[in-house]
Structure formats: C-alpha cells, structure tokens
C-alpha cells in the first residue's frame, strides 16, 4: 500500500470515528428528529394521509349508524305524534312493549359504535410508531420562538399567518404567503407551554396571551382535537406573569379563571396570595417587571448575527464598491475553457466569491436524492464526542465519490475552479445538509480553532477552504451571514459560495466567523466540500505575512 493509499484508508477510518460518514438509513429516521430536517417533516404527511383514510372510514360507518338511529327515532316519534294511535290495538301494544323491553336496549347498547371507534383506534396504533414524537413538538415550538426572535416577528401576526417584523411603530412584511394559514388557540397554547415548561416566560407570555385571546373568542365551542381550554391558558399565563414579577396581571387572570371554575381551591389560594402580596407592596399594582429575553452565553455576537439575518441577504451598498466585480471564470483550466463559470466577488477580506449556476437543476435534485436516505441529525464536536445541539438544527449525510459518477464530476469541477486538490485525503467527502423547521447554524468557524480538534486526527491539516453549494431555493431567510465581516449572502439556487478559512500563514481567518440564518419559509439544502491544507502546498503557497 502506497503513502497516498495509506492516508486515504486512515482518513476513511477517522471519518467513521468522527461520525462523518453516512450511517444506516434504517436509523436515519429516528423519532424525535423529524423537526430537524424539512424532508423528514414532509415524510410525516404520509402517516397523516393514512390517518385521514382511517377517519373517513370511521365517519362513513358512523354516518350509516346515525342514519339508522334517525330512522328509528322518526318511526317512534311518528307513533307518538299520531293521536289516533290507540294502545288498544294489540299490535301497537305489542310493539310498544317490545320497544321498551328490547329495541331501546339494543339501540343504547349497540356494538356498532364501539366497533367503529375500535377500528379507528386499532388503525391509529398501527400508524403511531411512524408519527413524530413529543420531542418533535418541542423542537417545532422552539423553532417558532427562534424565528420570532431572529426576525423580530409579531406573535399576534404569526398566529394569523402573517410574517411581519415589528420594530417600534415600523411594520415590515418579510414574506407574503399565497394562502394565509392561521393558528388555533390550542396551537398557540402548545407553543407557550413549551416555553413555560422551560421556565422561559419571555416567550411563554405572548404565546399564552394569544391563546387566551383566541379561547375567549370561541368559548363554549369545544373542538375534539384540542388538548387545552381557556382555563388551562389562564392558569399558565397567570403563573407566568407571577414568575415574571407582574403580580397584578397574575391576580386579574386568576380571578377570571375562577369565573369559569369557581370551585378550584388551588386558584382560590393563589388569588389570596396575590392579593396579600399587593397589599404589602401597593406599588406592585402599577409596576410591571420588564421581561428579559433569555441569555445565550455561547452567542456573544447575537445582535450582529440577528441584524445580518434580518437583511435577508440584501446588500444595498454592494454595487457601490468598485473593487467588487463579476466575471466569467476559467481559472486557466482547460476543463472550464468552453464553459466558464459566472463569478461574483462578494467580499475581499475575507475573500468570498459566489459562482452562479455551478450545478443545474437535475444535478442538484440528484445530489439531494442520493443523500436523503442517509440523513441523520447534524452534530458538533464536543470534546471527544459528537452531539446534536440546539444551535444547529439540520440533518446531514456524507457521500463518497464512489456513490455516483456525478460526485466525481462535481469534484473535477470544484478542483478546476479553485485550483485545489479535492481528492481524499486532501478534502472531505461531500456533506449534504437539509435544514429543519427554522433550521439554522449559529456563528461558527469551519476551520479548527483548537489544537485538540478532531479535524487534526485526519492527518491532512486544517480546513483551508470551504466550497458550499446551494442545492435549493427558499422563500425567505436562510442567508449565510459573516459576522465580523458584517455582510450576508442570500440563498441562490444552484450557486456555490467559496471562501478561504486560513491565511497563507496557516493561521485561521477570524473574519470567516459565519452562520446559517434560520430558514423563515422554504426547504434549504446545501452541499459542503471542505478542503484541507495538505496537498495544497504548491497550489496555494504559504506566506509569512499575516495579512495574506
């Protein structure tokens, strides 16, 4: 075995140890991870279609049963309404006795109703293992809160199906859906309750307030599918306000609760407690505590990051900078001579370029299709382990170039355009990523920032460059934001974004700190090719100058 083959074998083994290769597709659809990739969410439509079929069958059975009950009711009612119906008629007298002794018992204890509901329940139990888990509901609720925060969305507007950023008195439409889809009171309650259970009253209060408002408007109109009620929403909202320091609101809501449930002793005790607190501190009546947004200790650049995401990738002054330009790029490669790639220089320091139409629709779709069966929850390195985290919501798969000839073609194209060696062990396998509901990846570096990083075990140096291909478009959100460089790039379908992670000295470029902004609306797919230092010594020569 030659040195190159040995390095390739070592790389393959290390990728396996680092969970950087495709897993077992049977385990790729683990329950509790549905929310983390939109393709998994789309697959959940299948079980719901099966449930709809079961419910339709149940309804047809119930409709037939109710028609028969209506027939029986009409028959008996007609006998009572006919004043000329004498019980002296032995036939009528017999049927009366029979009805009361037998017919009514059969009607009341009919097994048809229980058989219909049993069939529905049995069908549900067969589908149940394919349904999203409670962790998915929590993940989806947290996604709505994340979108609410990052894009400054109004909760009341979201509940109506409107995506509006509200900053003071300024209201901006971020996305206008073709069809408005509003949330129910129970929907809003569930989002608020997820925040409430985490002790996050900053998010819990506006969602629970909207739930209370909607429940009030439909009070008495109970829906079979609802888990919560007005009383539940008032109960949670009152305590959330109390925990947030607003005792007067907690008291008002608790009193309202008792109007609907006057025998609730726990709530009666809460009212007495709140009244006592306000009597001891009268200024609490008018003083409302300012609820602070939960702190995120690991995200020190939150304001800059969210500000860049809110631009949705727009660059209003981009074309005022003369040093930025567009061109047809061949990189002096015969491979690109007859079909150069449209190149757009986005930024100079760090050097970031966008290659338009790097792949076509057919290629993008094929790459997504190759990756989909192998998608697993994306992880980040935490010491020796690889863990799923809240600040990275997506699923990913790793594709070797032996999977399909298209991946070999893609490697040749990337190598020709960048002038770098993109074959293992000098580059990693292609990573394909599908983002989930509100999917994002908070600010991070692609290159290793610690000498103990697992990347160095691959014996091919640090990640010198990133080549990221947008395999889909999105309706809104999902931009790539460069935090310290203070710019963002929108999702451009079939385009590829390239940047250097390291200076020529081998030191990491701090200005490449970047993030995948939350996807507001749409299904975002990207493919990443990470190229390493070793093998590039003559392709990108070193320099001792730190600015190079």
Image (cartoon, helix red, strand yellow):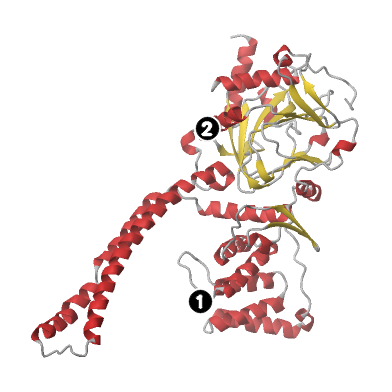
In the foreground, 142 or 9? 142
Q: Which residue is mark 2?
A: 23
Counting residues from the start of the chain, the first of labels 2 and 1 encountered is: 2
Q: Which-is-in-front pick, marks 2 and 1? A: 1
In the rendered image, the residue lying farthest to the top is 2
- Distance of label 2 from label 1 (alpha carbons): 51 Å
From the top left corner, tell me how far across and down residue 111 is, in percent: 25, 66
Q: Quadrant of the C terminus?
A: top right
| Residue 337, position as x, y percentages in the image | 73, 14
Q: Quadrant of residue 88?
A: bottom left
Rendered view: 381 above or below 307 = above
Q: Horizontal and vertical percent for residue 396?
A: 59, 36
Residue at the left extreme of this rendering: 90
Q: What residue is drawn where x is 76% and y is 49%?
A: 310
Q: Which residue is mark 1?
A: 220
Whether residue 390 is visible, yes or no, is no
**Residue 311, x across and y down, in percent:** 78, 47
Front residue of 345/126: it is 345
Q: Secondary structure at mark 2?
A: loop
Q: Residue at x 61, y 57 (%)?
A: 180
359 horizontally vs 482: left or right: left
The crowd level at tag 2 (other Cα within 10 Å; few <14, some 14-19, many 20+) is some
Residue 427 seen = yes
Q: Classify residue 499 as left or right of residue 191.
A: right
């Amino acid at each position: 075995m030659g040195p190159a083959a040995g390095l390739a074998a070592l790389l393959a083994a290390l990728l396996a140890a680092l969970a950087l290769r495709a897993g077992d597709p049977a385990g790729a659809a683990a329950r509790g991870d549905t929310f983390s990739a939109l393709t998994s969410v789309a697959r959940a439509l299948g079980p719901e279609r099966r449930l709809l079929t079961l419910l339709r069958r149940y309804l047809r059975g119930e409709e037939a049963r109710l028609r028969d009950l209506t027939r029986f009711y009409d028959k008996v009612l007609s006998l009572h309404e006919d004043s000329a119906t004498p019980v002296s008629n032995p036939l009528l007298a017999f049927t009366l006795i029979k009805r009361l002794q037998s017919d009514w018992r059969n009607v009341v204890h009919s097994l048809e109703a229980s058989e219909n509901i049993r069939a529905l329940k049995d069908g549900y139990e067969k589908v149940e293992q394919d349904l999203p888990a409670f962790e998915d509901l929590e993940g989806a609720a947290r996604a709505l809160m994340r979108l609410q925060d990052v894009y400054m969305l109004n909760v009341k507007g979201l509940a109506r199906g409107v995506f509006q950023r509200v900053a003071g008195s300024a209201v901006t439409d971020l996305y206008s859906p073709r069809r408005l889809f509003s949330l129910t009171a129970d929907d809003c309650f569930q989002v608020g309750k997820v925040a409430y259970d985490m002790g996050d009253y900053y998010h819990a209060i506006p969602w629970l307030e909207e739930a209370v408002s909607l429940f009030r408007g439909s009070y008495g109109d109970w829906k079979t599918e609802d888990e919560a009620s007005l009383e539940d929403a008032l109960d949670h909202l009152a305590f959330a306000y109390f925990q947030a320091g607003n005792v007067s609101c907690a008291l008002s809501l608790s009193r309202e609760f008792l109007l609907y449930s006057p025998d609730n002793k726990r709530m009666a005790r809460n009212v007495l407690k709140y009244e006592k607190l306000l009597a001891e501190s009268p200024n609490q009546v008018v003083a409302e505590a300012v609820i602070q947004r939960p702190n995120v200790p690991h995200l020190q650049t939150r304001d800059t990051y969210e500000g860049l995401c809110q631009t949705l990738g727009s660059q209003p002054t981009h074309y005022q900078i003369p040093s930025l330009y567009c061109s047809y790029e061949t990189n002096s490669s015969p491979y690109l001579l007859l079909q150069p790639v449209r190149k757009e220089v986005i930024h100079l320091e760090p050097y970031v370029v966008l290659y338009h139409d790097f792949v076509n629709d057919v290629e993008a779709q094929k790459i997504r299709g190759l990756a989909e069966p192998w998608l697993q929850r994306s992880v980040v390195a935490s010491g020796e382990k690889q863990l799923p985290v809240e600040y990275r919501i997506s699923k990913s798969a790793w594709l070797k170039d032996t999977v399909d000839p298209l991946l070999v073609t893609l490697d040749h194209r990337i190598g020709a355009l960048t002038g770098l060696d993109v074959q293992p062990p000098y580059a990693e396998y292609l990573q394909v990523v599908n983002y989930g509901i509100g999917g994002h990846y908070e600010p991070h570096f692609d290159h290793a920032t610690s000498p103990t990083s697992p990347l160095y075990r691959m014996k091919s140096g640090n990640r010198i460059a990133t080549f990221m291909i947008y395999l889909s478009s999105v309706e809104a959100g999902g931009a790539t934001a460069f935090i310290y460089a203070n710019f963002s790039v929108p999702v451009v379908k079939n385009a590829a974004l390239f940047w250097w992670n390291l200076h020529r000295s081998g030191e990491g470029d701090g200005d490449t700190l970047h993030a995948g902004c939350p996807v507001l609306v749409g299904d975002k797919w990207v493919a990443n090719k990470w190229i390493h230092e070793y093998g590039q010594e003559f392709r990108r020569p070193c320099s001792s100058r730190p600015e190079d």
